[in-house]
Structure formats: C-alpha cells, structure tokens
Amino acid sequence: MLSNRFTLFLSSLLLHLVVSCGTDDGEQNAAGKYSLYTMNKDLSNTILTTNTVDSGNLTISKNGIDVSTKLFDRSIIVKDKHFYFLRAGKFRKYILEPNGLKEIAQLDMQDRHIENISWIHQDTLLLFTSDNKTNRRLWIYKIAVHDFKINQQQEIKLPPAAADFKILSVGFGTIHQQQLLVGYTFNKVINETDFTTIDTLYVATLDKATLRLKNIQKDIRSTYPGGVNTVQSYSFHDENGNFYFMSCPGIALGNSPSKPTAIFRIDSNSTHINPTYFLNLTAKTHNHAYGMWYLGNNQAIVRSERRDRYTDFSDHHSTYQFEYYVVDLIRQTTKKLNLPFDKGTRKESVLVENGKAYITIDDAKDQHQVWVYDITSKNIQVGLTLDQATDFIVRIDRLN
C-alpha cells in the first residue's frame, strides 16, 4: 500500500505500472476459476489462481505467479480469462501463463490514465480516462475486447466547478435508463502531501450512442462519488434496476471528512439522484467507509475504517482497523460482521457469487484468509488460506 495520501491520490490519477516475471517453481496454476492479487512481505507482487476459495491452502513461493512491480500494479481489469491494463500509452490485453502475464494485444492511448470502467456488454468495455498533463480532461473509449479495437472515442467537456478545483475525479460510469451516467467531482492540491475535494458531487447524463452531454446534476449532501473502480468497487445496479453508489469523502479518497460517507440511489425509472434517499453511513458507524458490494435482496457489504485505531493517513494502510458491515438498503440499517480487523486502505476484497460473499482479510495474527459469508444463513467460516509470505491480498476476482 502507499505511504501518504498525496502519493495515493496521484497513483489513482497516474496508473502506469504492468507485467510479468517468471518463477522457477512448477506448481503454478494459471487456469483456475478465481484469481487473487497479493502484495508480499519481500515487496514482490503475485497472482494466484485456484478452482475454489471455500477451503484449502496456497503458498506464494509454490503457487504464486510473479508480477513485476515495475510494470504492473493491482489496478487491473480481470474478465473472462484475460487481464487488461493501461501502461506507457498503450491499453494492453494479457493472458496468464505459468511464467507470467503474456501480452497478446495493445491499443494506442497516449497521455491517458484510467479513472473508471464499465462493462456494458460481455464484449464491450467503456474506459473513462483523463490526461496525465492536466488531470482535467475526460475521454471515453468504447472498446470491443474480443477483436480488441476502439469502436468509439470522445472527449467530454465538463464545465469547471471553481477556479482552484481543477483536478477531475470520475467515480462511476453506468448505462441507466438508456443513458450514460457519469459521477464525478473536482479536487485541488493543497501542498506536496495533501489535497482536498470540492463540497459537491456531480452526475452528468450523456446520450448513450453519441456521448453528447445532455445535463449535469449537483448534490451537496456529500462529495467524492465512488472512486477508481479498478482498485475497489463502489456502485451497482440491484435486481429491480435501481442504481446505488457511495460517496467517499474520508481521508483516503476525497479528504473532505466533514462530509458524511453515504449511499445514494438513482431509481430505476429515473436518471436523477433520488432527493429523498440518503443512507448516511457515517451516522450509522461513526466512521468513513470505502468500498461497497451488492449481495442481492436489497443488501450490500461496505468496508469501514475505524478512526480510533489509526493515527493519520501515514498508518491508515498498515493499521488493523477495517470492519465489514451488511447494509439493508431499504430499512437503512447496518450490522457488523464478526470478522477480524482487516488492513489495507483500498482493496477489491469482496467477491459475491452463488449466495456467498468471499471476503479477504489480512489480520493482526498475520493470517491471510478468505472468509466465507453465507448470505442466507448468515454463517461465517474460514475458506482459502495463504501463507505468511503474504502482506496484503489486494484483490479477489472471478477469472474463468
């Protein structure tokens, strides 16, 4: 994880690290159903794959596939046996092999970094990118990932909010009511190690086909909608077509902590933020939160910090402080799960499928485990365990 807030902020703007190194051990599996990305105590990074995360043991030395930290980081896109990453002016496509990630295709994408992504079809990916020079301009790319070609690209000219808030942060992009909705806000740098966010979040409505800007909504109840979703998830559609997103004004993202972390809803029959729906998570937990995953049946998991357990942003990532709550989106209640404190400021640490939530925890006993939460029975038990060469499990994905 990163050592100061400004470094983390710039890394979310300037993702420029990707792929592969080999390993001498012959027990690596590159074709498992699930992949886990780890940051290790020896400062290496690895990808491990497995056919089950409900049980078992894996070790970094025997089962991990090494990933070069000079070329790659955990802000990876994982889908249908492939990995995608933007590095050095190229959007690149990879397959995983026992000796590393192998690049199989690339697209030119100069002076860009990824702010957000959205899979609008199984084969179609929207990239929401900004430029590396000003961090102010927004481009949207529509990419056919099978043929690996750009079918559409367009700069979206968003009006500035204030003279001193010039840096754009895109927190979500989604197709809703046959329109493209883009949630964003603006930041400003205070000094070499600090930044903050304007007191407003924005949602732009674009024509889905032409990407023409149609209107912009503003909401001052919180700020910093979502976040870079290649690092962590912050939004979803439910079974009824309602779209939920969380705001993240805490010190690790928006750094406007006087605003509450909250969940917003855009109803299934509207493209506007519901003005009467506001699930104030800070009021419920007395803390800020980062990360939200849908469980189904109007329930979600959120990952919440504990202000009484860390000093400031310098130890935010290394302190065992993070708790997981099940949120009832209708009743607006929260219930803390009986799990060890987790560490790591932002992680894609939850995978939901087949009635279970798989939650990765790096705990104070130096255990690195997948915990299995049965959504119906509420039972929690330990699943897959990694060895103590692991420092952080920073993401868990369905690979195949």
Image (cartoon, helix red, strand yellow):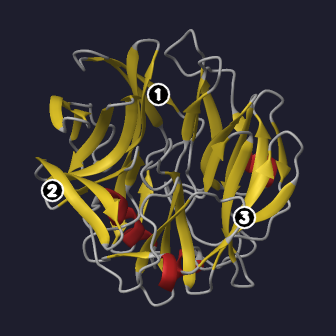
Q: Earlier in the sequence, mark 2 or mark 3?
A: 3
Q: Please, what secondary structure does the residue beneath circle 3 have? A: loop
Q: Position of residue 286 (x, y in %)?
A: 77, 56
Image-quadrant location for residue 5:
bottom left
Residue 111 spot, x, y in % from top left? 13, 53
- Is residue 259 in view from this perspective? no
Circle 1 residue: 218
Residues at circles 1 and 2 in contact by the CB criterion of under 8 Å: no
Residue under label 3, please give it: 55
* Amino acid residing under circle 2: Lys
Residue 399 x, y percent position in the rendering = 47, 51
Label 1: few (<14), some (14–19) or many (≥20) C-alpha neighbours in 10 Å? some
Residue that appears at 51% across and 59% down: 255
What residue appears at the point 71 percent right and 71 percent down from the top-left corner? 321
Closer mark to the observer between disc 3 and disc 1:
3
**Label 1: element kind:** strand
Q: Residues within 10 Å of mark 2 (few under 14, many from 20)?
A: few
Depicted 256 relative to depicted 99: above or below: above
- Between the C-alphas of marks 1 and 2, the distance is 26 Å
The mark that comes first in sequence, 3 or 1, is: 3
Q: Is residue 247 above or below residue 55?
A: above
- Give the side of residue 254 with respect to residue 17, left or right: right
Residue 90 showing in the rendered view:
yes
Which of the two discs, 2 and 3, sits closer to the camera?
3
* Nearer-N-terminus badge (1/2): 2
Residue 93 on image: x %, y % = 24, 51
Q: Nearer the viewer, mark 1 or mark 2?
A: 2
Of residues 160 and 213, the one drawn nearer to the viewer in this rendering:
213
Q: Which kind of residue does numbered mark 1 sit on?
A: Lys
The amino acid beneath tag 3 is Ser
CA separation in Å, label 2 and label 3:
46 Å
Residue at image mark 2: 133
